[in-house]
Image (cartoon, rainbow, N blue to C red):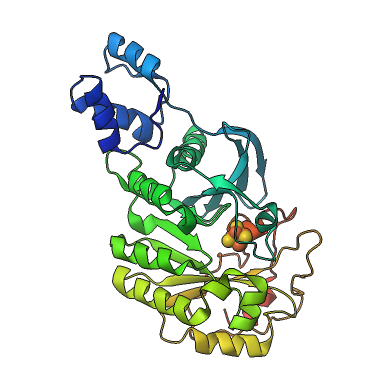
Amino acid sequence: MVDLLGMTLEEIEEFIQGLGKERYRARQLFRWIYKKGVYNFGVMTDLSKSFREELARMARIWAPVEVHRAASEDGVVKFLFRLEDGAHIESVLIRDDDRRTVCLSSQVGCPLGCRFCATGRMGFARNLAAGEIVGQLLHIRKVLWEEGEDLTNVVLMGMGEPLLNYDQVLKVVRLIRHEMGIALGARRITLSTVGIVPGIERLAGEGIPLGLAISLNAPDDAIRSELMPINCEYPLRILLRAAKDFARTCKRRITFEYVLIHGVNDRLRDARQLADLLQGIPCKVNLIPYNPIPNAPFRRPPLDRAPPLPGGPPFQPLHRHPEGQPRTGYPSCLRPAPDINRVPKKYLSELGL
Ligand code: SF4
């Protein structure tokens, strides 16, 4: 049985030609799957009945199954999916003004073990196949369609490290961009990484102007290595050089994600060091107050006092939501938090934002 979900147009063409059918049949099938989100061969009415029956014998379109959905007041909806082998992954829909963003997982678990992250503690099970990744997107797009809305943006920022599943993730990026299918431009797609430098370099070489978000979380190697073991392999100097090269090659500003952890990386000296560190890199910094997880030695900064991180370059284009509230659903390190981060306006006004 051939799995069609996750196949590129070229792969579907090859399959169709193997059945002795005309090449244009592949384009019809591709449109049904990715443009219309239809998985049932029986309703693909522009295909002959005998061909549909043949497809049903030879192939299938299998997607992750939604087993749970949790919506929060601020328009964030979390979806729990079950995969065919019984593993579970999570995806998130974020409604933000007129943007409808899906956040996709790329692995079951994660091998990188960031100390502040619940997924890191789960360990690593396996990479997701392209069909399992794009299947999350198609499911959530259908949910939006049922509510009269449509998908506008995609972030690869859910469970796992996308650059450790490079080939499948790139395949998904190509599927998302394909004009006969989902048809979202590269500028509407953001890939988030902890800083797998060879992956960033390879991605820059693809010449796709994707958004790149880097989970930074520290102003120096000592703090970062303590929080994120991957920093021992790719320390800040080479990570930031790769980030700068990516920004230049792809003509995209880098987003640095910075989870604020009380007493660890949120002090005035950290802010000054971070400002120096990011000089010369076209970037914005997304500050995210830490959402504690059980049995972790970290705390969220008190939100009733101004945090010491300053405004001004390179924080000038600091990302925040219009209400001044970071949202749940972005980095997987926030995933298990039972509550929604609420940052008082004072927090941001004292930053000069
Ligand atoms: S923060 Fe990201 S890279 Fe680090 S352990 Fe969690 S999922 Fe993996």
Quarter of the image where ligand 1 sits: bottom right
Q: Nearer the viewer, residue 141 or 231?
A: 231
* Residue 4 visible here: yes
Q: Is residue 25 above or below residue 64?
A: above
Q: Is any atom of residue 286 visible in this view?
A: no
The residue at 66%/44% (across/down) is 71
Quadrant of the drawing holding the N terminus: top left
- Residue 60 lies, with reference to residue 260, above or below; the image says above
Q: Residue furthest right?
A: 295
- Relative to 55, residue 122 above or below: below
x and y, in percent, of residue 254 in the image: 43, 71
Left/right placement of residue 7 relative to residue 335 reads left
Tell me which residue sits at (62%, 70%) in the image. 228
Relative depth, front residue between 15 and 249: 15
Residue 18 location, x and y as percent?
Answer: 24, 24
- In the displayed orientation, state which residue is furthest to the top: 50
> What residue do we see at 54% from left, 49% from top?
107
Residue 93 in the image, given as x and y percentages of width and height: 55, 47
Q: Could you tell whether 149 is left or right of 335 in the image? A: left
Q: Quadrant of the C terminus?
A: bottom right
